[in-house]
Amino acid sequence: MMSTNEESSVSFTVQRGWNHKQSVKAAELYEQAFGEKFRAAIPSTTDRLALLSECLIPEFSLCSLDEGEMIGLAGFQTELGALTGGITLSTLLKHCGLVKGMWAALVLSLLDREANASELVMDGIVVDAAYRGQGIGAELLDGIIEYARDQGYERVRLDVIDTNPRAKALYQRKGFEAKEHTSFPWLKWLIGFSGATTMVYELVPLKQ
């Protein structure tokens, strides 16, 4: 799947996945958006970047490219796998050691989400800081919805944390509906937020 954004002042393409040479850039983008979220599990930025560079799985993502340079990334999860599916106990132990690796696995288990056979679960959108405000995130979200529809899924599901109202507003504009809010104030000291809203986009097959 590939599309070209013609409305933005930046000319970029959206495609599924990336090649091996872009693994470091993908890790850096993911770290920009979610590094703080994972800090409690893996305090070292160096360790996080090394882990992400090795473990992110390209086929469960869409990325935006500006003349071949990755400038945006949207991850997703299905019953077949996930962008972060390569982060396992063994890879955590490899990059963090025994004690720190076990701790990281415990913390990350609190953030686990699973997709069922009828849905695609969003795993976050990030746009390089130098390119924000130009519609790239919205284009990636449109691409995720299009991909989910093409693959026959019935819905796209995501969880947006309470500390990210801009993301929630974007999802609402795109047609996502808030379905459930979960509060966990006792975990804020650990993961940095105390609640999340589950939002769903119901997919209607396009008429032939």
Image: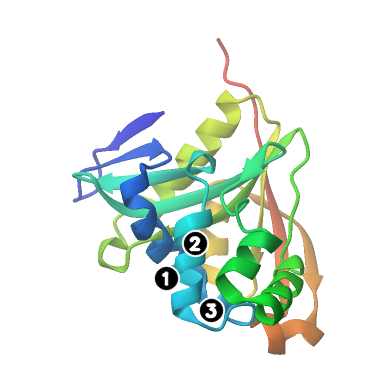
Disc 1/disc 2 C-alpha distance (Å): 12 Å
Which of the pair 144/116 is nearer the observer? 116
Q: In the figure, 39 relative to 198: above or below?
A: below
**Residue at 52% across / 70% down in the picture?**
34
Q: Amino acid at mark 2?
A: Leu
Q: Amino acid at mark 1?
A: Gln
Mark with earlier residue (2, 3): 3
Where's residue 164, x and y in %?
56, 72
Where's residue 19, x and y in %?
36, 42
SS assignment at label 2 = helix
**Residue at 73% across / 74% down in the picture?**
102
Image disc number at residue 52: 2
- Determine the image quadrant of residue 130: bottom left
**Residue at 59% across / 54% down in the picture?**
84
Image disc number at residue 36: 3
Q: In the figure, 29 relative to 206: above or below?
A: below
Q: Residues within 10 Å of mark 1 (few under 14, many from 20)?
A: some
Q: Is residue 100 left or right of residue 12?
A: right
Q: Amino acid at mark 3?
A: Glu
Q: Viewer-nearest of labels 1 and 2?
A: 2
Q: Which residue is denoted by mark 1 in the rendering?
A: 32
Disc 1/disc 3 C-alpha distance (Å): 8 Å
